[in-house]
Amino acid sequence: MAPASKAKMKAAVDVGAWMFNAVTSVGIIIVNKALMATYGFSFATTLTGLHFVATTLMTLVLRWLGFIQYSHLPLLELLKFILFANFSIVGMNVSLMWNSVGFYQIAKLSIIPVLCLFEIVFDNLRYSRDTKLSIGLVLIGVGVCTVTDVSVNMKGLVAASIAVWSTALQQYYVHFLQKKYSLSPFNLLGHTAPAQAGTLLLVGPFLDYWLTNKRIDAFDYTTPSIMLIILSCIIAIGTNLSQFICIGRFTAVSFQVLGHMKTILVLILGFVLFGKEGLNLHVVVGMMIAVLGMIWYGNASSKPGGKERRSHPTPKQQRHGQDSTEDERV
């Protein structure tokens, strides 16, 4: 296949992977909002555990059909991933409870600079000025759209800090494990989903009771609420899989930047479904700024020098006077 054809094919698959993630992510937000707002099912951590049960069943079926081959992931690596992932889920839930919506959104936005720090420190990457500025523009735009009242207390700040750093570590580790151990998204989910399902279902009911003062076994399960729980679990399979696909194909930073497009889509969908309530001039301006930033980021990061890995020359190269900052594109 010609290089141009390969590039077009890769671009098409990249767009398809991102669209898959965007559709499933927006879909699960809508279903979960209906489940929680309409039926009062406020057990977010336990629901996430059920999502991973459904994802585990999917990986078992795919393994039985031969789509997932045997792969190895060291136990220590799996334990670290589960620790980061579960702290991310629990931290986000507690942060949302203890903080204002405005500060919660600011905390979510700060995941991007933390991921950039990880890539600079651990992957030895460097970003061009345009790439940095475009990321900043995305953050400003999404912030204008979503941040309203901002109030914070000490325990809320601690919860938000744990949520941000653990989420960044979890997303960085998805990319790291896929590359280091040559794992496909299906393989990695096959390793991580059962462990996450077990731990979250064990901890979830107690954590949810602590956060909501409601017992999951006392919930009034009706046919519509059960159907929404099942639908949420089905959509979550696609959300979990598409996240691993996207981070594997891009990087955790690119996934986060593009992921904020989902925030814009949710705002637009809310306008379409619920009318003009909540949509005002500063939200529209924020949307425009964020979209421009995403377009700029895509262009800047793909250019030579936009996002490169520093390569360290060998002693032989140094003796021949080669530049010690020579770069290799990633």
Image (cartoon, rainbow, N blue to C red):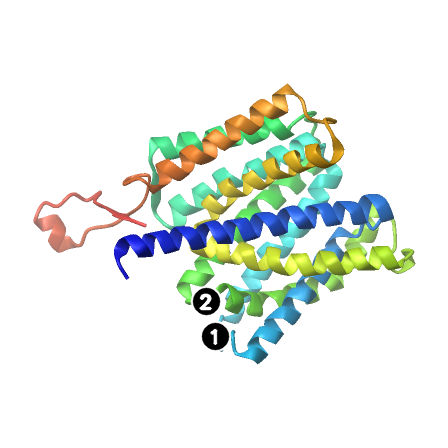
- 283 left or right of 203? left
Residue 77 in percent (x, y) is at 51, 65
Give the residue drawn at x 42%, y 67%. Answer: 181
x%, y% of residue 112? 50, 40
Please indicate, yes or no, whether residue 186 appears anywhere in the rendered image.
yes
Cα–Cα gap, marks 1 and 2: 7 Å
Residue 8 is marked as none
Binning the other alpha carbons within 10 Å of mark 1 as few (below 14), some (14 to 19) or many (20 upward) gives few
The residue located at (46%, 62%) in the rendering is 177
Tell me the kind of residue under disc 2: Leu
Q: Which residue is mark 2?
A: 183
Q: Quadrant of residue 199?
A: bottom right
SS under mark 1? loop
Quadrant of the drawing holding the N terminus:
bottom left
Taking 247 as reference, is 323 above or below it?
above
Left or right side of 111 for 179? left
Q: What is the crowding at mark 2: few (fewer than 14 residues within 10 Å), some, or many (at least 20)?
A: many
* 261 lies above or below 43: above
Which of these two is toward me, 42 or 237?
237
Dividing the picture into quadrants, the one containing residue 275 is top right
What residue sits 9% from the left and 50% below the top?
319
x and y percentages locating residue 282 in the rendered image: 62, 21
Q: Tell me, for residue 71, which label it has, or none.
A: 1
Q: How many numbered badges does the structure rendering display?
A: 2
Which of the two residues, 111 or 302, is positioned nearer the viewer here?
302
Taking the image as shown, residue 196 lies to the left or right of residue 206, namely left
Residue type at mark 1 is: Ser
- Indicate whether 197 appears above or below 272: below
Q: Residue at x 28, y 39 (%)?
A: 305
